[in-house]
Image (tube, rainbow, N blue to C red):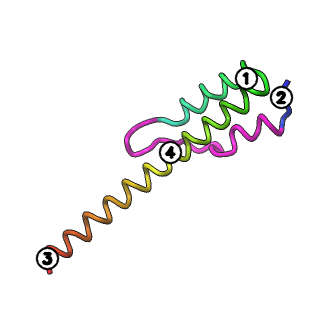
Amino acid sequence: MKSKSIESRFHQGTRGEHMVQANGFDLDIAMQKLHELSMQDGDLGFEYWHHVGQLLQRAAGMQAEIESLTGELERCRELLARS
């Protein structure tokens, strides 16, 4: 049986926020499914699915950063073209 501290770590990244990325992918649904899988697989399975969840959250954050930087790059190119 998993301890409360381990189980609470699975949800650390969400903090109850609705995580929908600009591309429309709903991370809340994915994180809930990963949590369900982690509860079925025992302690080792829990650690595995927890790690997968962290990677998914990091990838989504990186994608958001890429989209933001792409927008900034386009604005810079427009400014450069006007000069």
Q: Main secondary structure of the magenta part?
A: loop
Q: Which residue is mark 2?
A: 2
> Element under label 3?
helix
Question: Which type of secondary structure does the marked residue at label 1 adopt?
Answer: helix
* Secondary-structure class at tag 2: loop
Picture quarter with the C terminus: bottom left
Provide the residue designation for mark 1. Answer: 39
The picture places residue 36, in percent across and down from the top left corner, at 66, 23
* x and y, in percent, of residue 58 in the image: 55, 47
* Circle nearer the N terminus (2, 4): 2
Q: Which mark is residue 59?
A: 4
Instruction: Choose mark 1 or mark 4, whichever is in front.
Output: 4
Q: Earlier in the sequence, mark 2 or mark 1?
A: 2
| Mark 4 to mark 3 CA distance (whole Å) | 35 Å
Q: Secondary structure at mark 4?
A: helix
Q: Earlier in the sequence, mark 4 or mark 3?
A: 4
Question: What is the spatial separation of the Cα atoms under label 1 and label 3, in whole angstroms?
Answer: 57 Å
Among the two numbered marks 1 and 4 on one chain, the one whose residue lies closer to the N terminus? 1
The reply to whether dot 2 and dot 4 touch (C-beta < 8 Å) is no
> Residues under labels 2 and 1: Cα distance?
8 Å
Q: Few, some or many C-alpha atoms within 10 Å of disc 1 (few <14, some 14-19, many ≥20)?
A: some
Residue type at mark 1: give it.
Answer: Met
- Find the magenta span and give its range: 5-25
Q: Which residue is mark 3?
A: 82
Magenta span includes 28: no
